[in-house]
Amino acid sequence: MIEMQEVYKKYRNGVTAINGIDVRINQGEFVYVVGPSGAGKSTFVKMMYREEIPTSGTILMNGVNLAKLKMKKVPLYRRNIGVVFQDYKLLPTLTVYENVAFALEVIEASQKYIKKRVMEVLDLVGLKHKARMLPNELSGGEQQRVSIARSIVNSPKVVIADEPTGNLDPETTWEIMKIFEEINNRGTTVIMATHNRDIVNTLKRRVIAIEGGKIVRDEQRGDYGYEN
């Protein structure tokens, strides 16, 4: 599903963010990516959705080598990847419905299918009744639910979440995690970079720990393993 072989990422300022990573993640897994600030977690996940390109090495996503993927093919590739950010990245002038529908409109899906699919995913995240509201009329947790709905509306094989609960209170965090668990239960691979030790220690899944750009621990049903 996802495989990295001898991957390095060195930035122009001389910082080596990823320092020789080899890892394989199979379809349907739920993986936490943990580690101290500056360890390379964000670079690790950004390379999976082609926001960053490795300096050397191979990154295979469903057989596609992202290191050699041409820029013009990146949008097509990203249709199979859902990405959820800490700061939601919603379009402020569009309604909840329109924010989610936008991901289908760009691939020219039919209006009939868009309406059906958007309402399905809004129902999944519990926001069907707020479809006509604007992002600034929603709480932070609700905005993150919209972001998740948008990330899965294309039925991607992989959802990548970069600190998705970082701006949320504990109660809302658990509500969001239930949604991610449900997405995973339906067969989607979920890869989540997080600093939340409670989530990792409670909802036991595979844990990949990164320090100094290297994988220092890879455990099935692992613990967070760091002091906050």
Image (spheres, grey):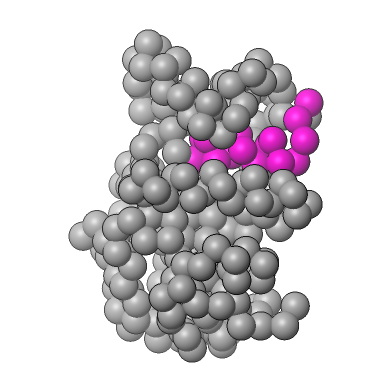
Residue at 39 percent across and 82 percent down: it is 21
Q: Is residue 138 magenta?
A: yes
Residue sitting nearer the eye, 76 or 219:
219
Q: Quadrant of the C terminus?
A: bottom right
In the picture provided, is 201 more to the left or to the right than 206? right
Which quadrant of the rendered structure holds the N terminus? bottom left
Residue 44, can we see it? Answer: no
Question: Which residue is located at x 60 percent, y 34 percent?
Answer: 146
Q: Relative to 33, say whether 21 is above or below.
A: below
* Residue 55, percent from left and from top: 41, 76
Q: Which quadrant holds residue 56?
A: bottom left
Q: Where's residue 192, x and y in %?
A: 52, 61
- Looking at the picture, does residue 192 appear above or below residue 93? below
On screen, residue 130 versus residue 192, left or right, reads right
Q: Which residues are magenta?
A: 137-151
Residue at x 57%, y 74% (from the top left corner): 34
* Main secondary structure type of the part rendered in magenta: helix
Q: Looking at the image, which is closer to me, 53 or 95?
A: 95
Q: x%, y% of residue 93? A: 69, 23
